[in-house]
Amino acid sequence: MVTGLRPLYVGGMGPPLDREGYFARWQDLHGGYDPRTGGVVLRGWLTVVYVLARPLARVGVHPDLVSWSSAGMAALVVGLSQVGGRWWIAAGCAVAASGLLDGIDGCVAVLQERTSRWGYVLDSVVDRVSESLFLVAVVAVGCPVWLAVACGFGCFLLEYLRARAGNAGGDDVGRITMAERSTRVILLALSILVSGLLPGRADTVSALGPAVLLAMTAVAVVQLGIDVRRRLVSL
């Protein structure tokens, strides 16, 4: 862990951890990858997460509670998607909220100095469950089942490759690809939300996000596979 940074919530002691300090902690916890020099989407996503996490960290909300809230919001997405019509707008917003909560839990843990191995495992499990529920929802809106299944398999393969690389002695992040979780959440949220705005074209609109994500994931798996092989061969 990066030293010299006080937890945000402890009795108001010391200066609060600013965004740059959070980025430094995030870098240390993610294999040395520096979000300050990474992609604009990741940097923007982490900035939004940081702003939303600060008040929760100050009042002492436990990061595990935020993780479970993310899973609960993902379940709500499925329920809203079954109602249909304009409720799909709410379902799309719920996808975005679930994704943000998933990022906020880790930020709260960092700000409160509560990062743990259990939190890491819980966050990963909630991620996979939530993504599966998002895909169930997008099928309910009108996306073909085969496309959603293919998309889910691609996302699972990407994260499995990353996890196995970490078990083999590499870092558990490696290359930040074009199909990271923030991108998945944004694309699926837009697919469902825009379907609610254009319910007469829901079958087409709901398939666009998963189709784009499937293509991006295929490229991302190749990107990450090349990077993992290079890193592991050099060990």
Image (cartoon, grey):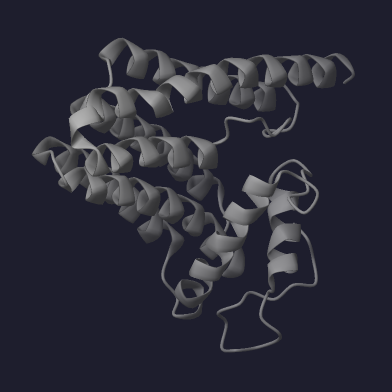
Q: Is residue 212 left or right of residue 174?
A: left
Where residue 39 sits: x, y (%)? 71, 43
Question: Which is nearer the eye, 1 or 37?
Answer: 37
Q: Extreme top residue here? A: 146
Q: Extreme left residue here? A: 83
Q: Quadrant of the N terminus?
A: bottom right
Camera sees residue 233: yes
Where residue 77 sits: x, y (%)? 24, 43
Q: Extreme right residue here? A: 234
Question: Which is nearer the eye, 210 or 205?
Answer: 205
Above/below status of 166 relative to 123: above
Where residue 186 sits: x, y (%)? 46, 42
Identify which residue is drawn at 45% across, 54% down: 100
Number of numbered discs visible in the structure rendering: 0
Q: Quadrant of the C terminus?
A: top right
Identify which residue is drawn at 76% across, 15% down: 226
Q: Is residue 82 left or right of residue 176?
A: left
Write down the quadrant of residue 8 in the picture.
bottom right
Q: Is residue 88 left or right of residue 225?
A: left
Q: Is residue 74 left or right of residue 23?
A: left
Where residue 83 sits: x, y (%)? 9, 40
Camera sees residue 113: no
Above/below status of 202 relative to 215: below
Identify which residue is drawn at 55% across, 79% down: 9
Identify which residue is drawn at 34% across, 23% down: 207
Above/below status of 43 relative to 214: below
